[in-house]
Image (cartoon, rainbow, N blue to C red):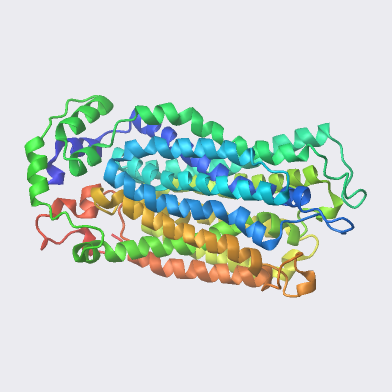
Amino acid sequence: MAKELQVLNALDAAKTQWYHFTAIVIAGMGFFTDAYDLFCISLVTKLLGRIYYHIDGSSTPGTLPPNIAAAVNGVAFCGTLSGQLFFGWLGDKMGRKKVYGLTLMLMVVCSIASGLSFGHTAKGVIATLCFFRFWLGFGIGGDYPLSATIMSEYANKRTRGAFIAAVFAMQGFGILGGGIIAIIISAAFKDHFKAPPYSVDPVGSTVPQADYVWRIILMVGALPAALTYYWRMKMPETARYTALVAKNAKQAAADMSKVLQVEIMEEQAKVEELSKNSSGFGLFSKEFARRHGLHLLGTTTTWFLLDIAFYSQNLFQKDIFTAINWIPKAATMNAIEEVFRIARAQTLIALCGTVPGYWFTVALIDVIGRFKIQLMGFFMMTVFMLGLAIPYHHWTTKGNHIGFVIMYGFTFFFANFGPNSTTFIVPAEIFPARLRSTCHGISAAAGKAGAIIGAFGFLYAAQNQDKAKAEHGYPAGIGVRNSLFVLAGCNLLGLLFTFLVPESKGKSLEEMSGENEEDDPTSETTYNRTAPV
């Protein structure tokens, strides 16, 4: 029985120790890089438009054509989706640790390569940028299932939720870090290379040196990942993988004796007995569908619905801020000034709404539980989205912008103190060890499918209903107001699908996944319950 293995009991009962914090930092720096790389592109897309798509004689600065903007914003998500499925599966086949360093190296190399995108024409630069951002996304995708699984398998059962949430919370610092780096770089270039606004001198408003700004911002993303590579390679394989999947009790006991600094007996006979008794069902078996089918449906649908709203909001903040006149009209600024203004606005939202939400989850997830936090988050996001959408015309009139930004910040707060954190945590806790990384990868990939819909769909949907007022090259859309109604609907559906996901607070991973009872299929165990406990 999994529950009788001393090495797993020792992990479940372990006091919070130094190794827990090092694991959070090592896994968390990967997430810092993930968020930095995924979201920093939204800071520089307007600049790319000015540099590479300038139209002589136009009254407004150049912007990326619709298909190019969609590709630049969305291609990394396509890579992430592929990486989540591939590395999630590989993490269960080869072991978490073996694959962990590979994803990090891919992120480092592709971050640098994105900034070095080459070519003399707009087509050449954008094509190479998209190519490297796809593979950057592929590496980032691997980080999702591996970081969550490693942290859940290292943690004790009392504070496991907080530890996995703390890894994910580094995403908030990554978004914030992206904004701060963009502010520093754009401010330095702005002061050093003075330029008039576009309305005064269309060509002179974009200085040649502006081409370095976006490249440096993208390349800085390689630093935090490179700094943690050595420590990732030093981490031992998780005991749950070594004992329950690789069936090597001696290695599991030796690794955890070192980590926990206590003597742990190797129990090879027990591991072999467990392996004989276990049904060992696969992902596509009837047994998996019976035990975990509804759970996987719950984790995939909630993550999918959340990410439609979360990523469309995050990637298109700059468009929303411009629409409500919080960022001045593009023609009144030079190219680098625009980057500075967009970065400042996004950093403020990250600082006030995004980052605090993550840490509220860390503090309260093992007190309130995953289910209640997710339910409350979806509900509050729906309320605030409707609060933005219904009186939308009020928010866009002069003098009411601060109110809009506060409401908008609250939607981010409750996304992160809510489903954005819990959808990441729960799939790492409720599936068997041999399928844990794969199932997390499938859930995360469903989320990224939602992000792709958000990134591509919102770009078109948020355009003005009057084609004459839509951005150059875009068809008429449904407008920002109606788009917010659609996002509110997604949140409401997410709230309903949350009822398929079980509560895992305070339970061991083996208890949640049913691995304790696998030799007795008639036993009543956690996997039969979908209601919260």
Q: Residue at x 68, y 72 (%)?
A: 477
Picture coordinates of residue 462, whole percent (x, y): 67, 67
Q: Between 348 and 170, which is closer to the camera in this rendering?
A: 170
> For residue 244, which quarter of the picture?
top left
Q: Residue at x 23, y 30 (%)?
A: 256
Examine the rendering and report whether any part of residue 283 can be seen.
yes
Picture coordinates of residue 89, whole percent (x, y): 33, 50
Furthest-right residue in view? 200
Examine the rendering and report whether any part of residue 368 can be seen.
no
Q: Residue at x 8, y 48 (%)?
A: 276
Above or below, comparing residue 390 to residue 262 in the picture: below
In this rendering, the count of numbered labels is 0
Picture coordinates of residue 61, whole percent (x, y): 82, 54
> For residue 337, which quarter of the picture?
top right
Location of the C terminus (image quadrant): bottom left
Q: Between 306 and 197, which is closer to the camera in this rendering?
A: 197
Q: Residue at x 79, y 60 (%)?
A: 399
Above or below, comparing residue 373 to residue 40 in the picture: below
Q: Is residue 61 left or right of residue 132?
A: right
Q: Is residue 101 left or right of residue 184?
A: left
Picture coordinates of residue 514, whole percent (x, y): 19, 55
> For residue 271, which quarter of the picture?
top left
Q: Between 427 and 66, which is closer to the camera in this rendering?
A: 66
Q: Is residue 324 left or right of residue 365?
A: right
